[in-house]
Image (tube, rainbow, N blue to C red):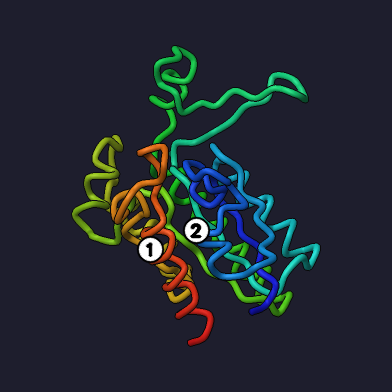
Amino acid sequence: MANIYFGGCSITEGDGFVAGKEDPRIYPNLLVSNAINDSEGGSSNIKIFLKAATAIVDNLANVYIIQWSALHRHWIYPTPDSGIHLSDTKDKHAKWYQERNHDYGNIIQLIQFCRILQDLAFSHNAKLLFINGLVNWSNDIEWMKELVADASSDHERFIENLQNNMELIDWNLWINPWSNMYDTKLDVAEDNLHPGPLTHKHIADQIRDKLIA
């Protein structure tokens, strides 16, 4: 199989497995023996996007498999060698940030990331696939209404904008767009938290089917 780049968070990194990235049971290693596994535990979607975009620009692989993480994951860097993960709402500063960081904007941002990667992959003659690792969203109109319910006015405008943006994504590139790997996991890894071997095999089978279609 072609040289494959994998981007994502702890799921793709192999957290919960004894051998981590080297564990033969995680989906990158089920697909290829020389996987370029550029995933990193705790990654935000912007970090995943930037690393993937750079990899495509640098022509690191023929195929790019990008696993998106949770919408609420964000990082700030007080110094060059330290980072603060803003998803822990037990921290008062993180809680303040998350309460003011609406999922609507994060979803629009994720859609833009997908569009840019789609264009980059096409211009570099590379294959691209997306995996829903931890994204909670839907294409159901009732879900969209609930998402924008706390807007002060003009709710229909926000719904229409979201629908228009979603139409710009090539959903044929997605393995599991509306059901993330945690919601549909078949088992757990050794840490009793992350998706386990059966879940990784299921994702690997879906990727393989997409690549040979």
On residue 147, the disc is none
Name the residue located 47 percent from the left edge and 41 percent from the top edge. Answer: 16
For residue 42, side relative to residue 185 (left or right): right
Q: Nearer the viewer, residue 13 or 46?
A: 13
Residue lying at the far right of the rendered structure: 58
Q: Pinpoint residue 197: horizontal percent, then vertical percent.
A: 41, 56
View extreme (left): residue:
142
**Circle nearer the viewer, 1 or 2:** 2
For residue 57, side relative to residue 140 (left or right): right
Q: Reply above or below: 110 against 10.
A: below
Name the quadrant containing residue 201. bottom left
Can you give x and y, in whole percent of width and height, for residue 183 in the image? 29, 50
Where is residue 94 drawn, in percent x and y?
47, 20
SS for callout 1: loop
**Nearest the eye: 111 or 174:** 174
For marks 1 and 2 on the same chain, the one whose residue lies earlier in the sequence: 2
Going by the numbered disc 1, the residue's amino acid type is: Pro
Q: CA distance from mark 1 to mark 2?
A: 23 Å
Of 152 and 103, the residue lying toward us? 103
Q: Secondary structure at mark 2?
A: loop
In the rendered image, which residue does mark 2 sit on?
Answer: 25
Mark 1 lies on residue: 177
- Residue 118 position in % (x across, y down): 59, 69
**In the orientation shown, which residue stands out farthest toward the bottom?**
213
Q: Residue at x 38, y 56 (%)?
A: 162
User: Can you tell which quarter of the image residue 55 is in?
Assistant: bottom right
Residue at (41, 41) in percent of width and height: 190
Vertical relation: 77 (above or below) 21: above
